[in-house]
Image (cartoon, rainbow, N blue to C red):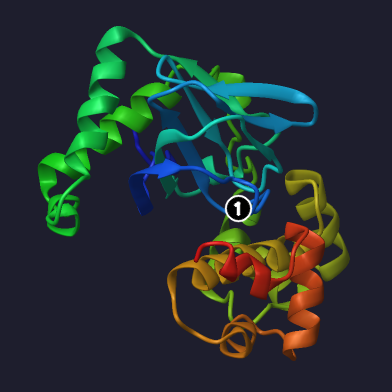
Amino acid sequence: MTPMRDINYPSLKLYSIGCQRVIDWSGAVPMRSHWRLWRNRQDGASVVHYGQERLISPGNAVIVPPDTPIKHRLRNPVDSLAIHFSLGQPFDFFRGKVLSFQLTTSLQNEFDQLCDSLKGIEDAAKIQTMDFRFGLTSLICGMLSSVPEHDWPKPPADERIRKTLSMMEEYLSAPLSNKILAKKAGLCPNAFARLFKLSMGKSPQAHQLSRRLEEASLLLRYSGDSIEAIAEKFGFCDRHYFSRMFRKKYETGPAFYRNSFQ
């Protein structure tokens, strides 16, 4: 049998799903820390990524990867299905492009049925059924399976870096020093820092900061915790510093980010 050690598979986590009439998209935040999928029942909406426009229509779905800045365009009201989700690492490190998918008639019907099924008073109960979970996972992963292999991020080849990444995920609330991480990797701090940047494209501290902000953004969206409590939870010394770092990454402050969902 083929050894399965260190082989990662997508682990879909659903943050929100809904089908609603959209009449104003002007308040939408340009960047999120999770994947976003849109498919509309009418023409008239699109997203723009660095000048390239992607139409969202009955025959075309758009998926925006995490930390990918976009501008929203809405020319007329549309009935829109929106799904926010994550896939786990390393898949959530996908960057650089907005994905557009031409839908077959079969997939269009599947999206229509999904949108219809979300209407009514039993939405919360329905999305917890195994049938719904496996169906949604199959739909999303089936679309993403058409993305070329070379576009997907690969886990670091060096096992020492993989170990330190796992350690960072365990201690997002208490950022780890290079000295501690280097000890985990069995290297001196300078050698570890060089190896990490070579493998990940950023320093260990920059990676930790990015991950802390990503997790903080999810709490801003999906919890009722105060901004001060969220800042403290992820090791920021105060709200002011947290807000400054958050704005630098997401181009908006945490308060506006949270209010954009209301």
Instruction: Residue 231: give x, y in percent of width and height.
Output: 64, 84
Instruction: Residue 4: give x, y in percent of width and height.
Output: 35, 37
Q: Which residue is mark 1?
A: 32
Count of labels shown? 1
Instruction: Residue 6: give x, y in percent of width and height.
Output: 45, 43
Instruction: Tell me the SS state at disc 1.
Output: loop
- Which residue appears farthest toward the top when viewing the image? 105
Left or right of residue 73, residue 59 in this image: left
Instruction: Residue 245: give x, y in percent of width and height.
Output: 79, 71
Q: Is residue 94 visible?
A: yes
Q: Can you say whether 36 is above or below 58 in the image?
A: below
Q: Residue at x 13, y 57 (%)?
A: 125
Left or right of residue 152, residue 22 in this image: left
Q: Amino acid at mark 1?
A: Arg
In-front residue for pair 208/42:
42
Image quadrant of residue 82? top left
Q: Residue at x 71, y 84 (%)?
A: 236
Q: Can you say whether 131 is above or below 140 in the image?
A: below
Left or right of residue 26, residue 113 in this image: left
Q: Quadrant of the N terminus?
A: top left
How many C-alpha atoms fall within 10 Å of the one at disc 1: few (<14), some, or many (≥20)?
many
In-front residue for pair 182/92:
92
Q: Residue at x 74, y 23 (%)?
A: 52
Q: Is residue 186 visible?
A: no
In-front residue for pair 167/81:
81
Q: Residue at x 54, y 72 (%)?
A: 220
